[in-house]
Amino acid sequence: MSQISEHFGQDSIAPTPASERSMNFFGTFALWLAANVVITTVMTGMMFVPDISFKDAMLAILIGSLIGGVPLALTGNIGTRTGLPTMVITRASFGQKGAALPAIVNTIILIGWSWIQAYMAGLSLNYAIEYMTGYSNINLFVILTEVLVVCVTIYGHRGVESIEKWVSVAMLILSALLFFKLFTAYDASSLISMKLNENPEITGIIAFDIVVATAFSWMSTVCDFNRNCKSQKTGMWGTYLGYLLATLLAMGLGAVVSGFSILSNMEQTYDPTVLLSAYGFGLVASIVVFFSVLSTNVMALYSATMSFMNVFPKTGFWMPTLVMGILCTAGALLKETLMTHFFNFILLIATLFIPVFAIVLVDYFFLKKGQYDAEEIAFDRRGDYRYQKGVNIVAYVSYVVGAVFAYYFQYMKPLSIGSTILTFIVSGASYWILMEVSKQTSVKHNRETNINELEA
């Protein structure tokens, strides 16, 4: 068993040394491009049309991505500076023990997303195989998809990076083909002038808020990969530009597909395969969907493993990856049940996760002045980040304030301007104020407090 495991990834929660970092600008750009050209992002763009015009939808996607990409890149920069995975970094603000809860919740979220996306990838692979051979077996192709995901992820971050480079190039080529076929098969001018819903549920500002929320959904994983960036500059620009281009492509495709499906008197669909199948282009669409979901699922499984290791570091890397891969395969076989029940649950949990990274960013850039002791965060030798017996009560109070705000103004009394950015601001401001009042603004203070507690 040990000889077999030597060939698998040996990734750990220890800081990644500069000499072992492998991601240059292109690698970082390709990774975040491939990660976001995915069917769930296409679904987001589909939501906007015809509640708002196609022009307004593209404007909301552009501005939302430009703004939302900033905190994503900044969070990734913390990973590059420290060399630590995302959930390990939360120890610095939530405490060595307090960070366990966000890590467990993040693991559940990522496994849930993996279930949903593995089913979607299985559907697309089934369409492609059926188109070419006439054979159809959705369950089999769901299983094969997730087996492939595990086979890539189990080799660690280098396995992830290698597939993302190829997938990103393929996504650019295939996406260009899809847009070309859509705008030659359908009348582009009719998309611009199409009639809007008389009672829209989404306005331009809400669409903008949703786009920003999409960027926030990646913040729980970004450091898991950007810890391997060779430099801060290439890491930040690669992340920002890769995410920006991917969001414009995927959400733009969703808006186009939604608009043309309505104009063609078809059932509104997020799946370009359905729309393009009538023109003999469904095979290319299904391949785009399959590879995009495959690449995103690889990243989700990898980050789920790193989150799990933040709580149970002695388990190693490849065994949790294998076990969670099996769980993802079993969950994906629930198929339509995922879309009708679990999808809304995952969206709720993801919304309530936004305050976590408001707290992390404020803690690192404002309170700790961009200075973390990565070795101490990972191994807790001196107790600099233990706060109150391992838990930072201020962080948890601030999180509750932000989570309650998010839930109330997202589900109970939705705001006309959306709640994502406001949740981020309320959470970060609460944490900053409470930390200043409690005088826990530096590692030095934490160390002195721990010494006093030991002496007492």
Image (cartoon, rainbow, N blue to C red):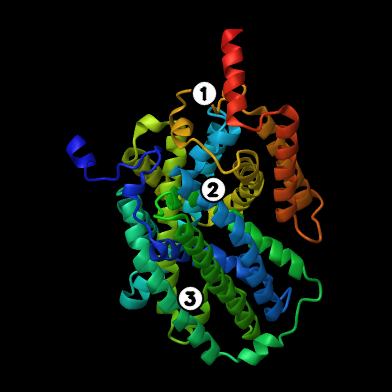
Task: Report x, y in % for residue 128.
Answer: 37, 73
Looking at the image, is mark 1 or mark 2 nearer the viewer? 1
Task: Name the residue rendered at 45%, 33% in the picture.
Answer: 378
Query: Which residue is disc 1 drawn over?
Result: 383
Specify the amino acid type for callout 3: Thr
**Residue 146, image x, y percentages:** 37, 54
Q: How many marks?
A: 3
Q: Closest to the observer: 39 or 442?
A: 442
Task: Classify 10 Å Cα crowding around label 3: few (below 14), some (14-19), many (20 and above).
Answer: many
The Cα–Cα distance between marks 3 and 2, rounded to whole angstroms, is 30 Å
What residue is at 34 percent from the left and 61 percent from the top?
A: 163
Image quarter where the N terminus lies is top left
Q: Which residue bears the numbered disc 3? A: 273
Q: Is residue 241 above or below residue 444?
A: below
Gap in angstroms between the C-alphas marked 1 and 2: 24 Å
Q: Nearer the viewer, residue 373 or 200?
A: 373
- Where in the figure is residue 280, as x and y percent of width and height? 43, 85
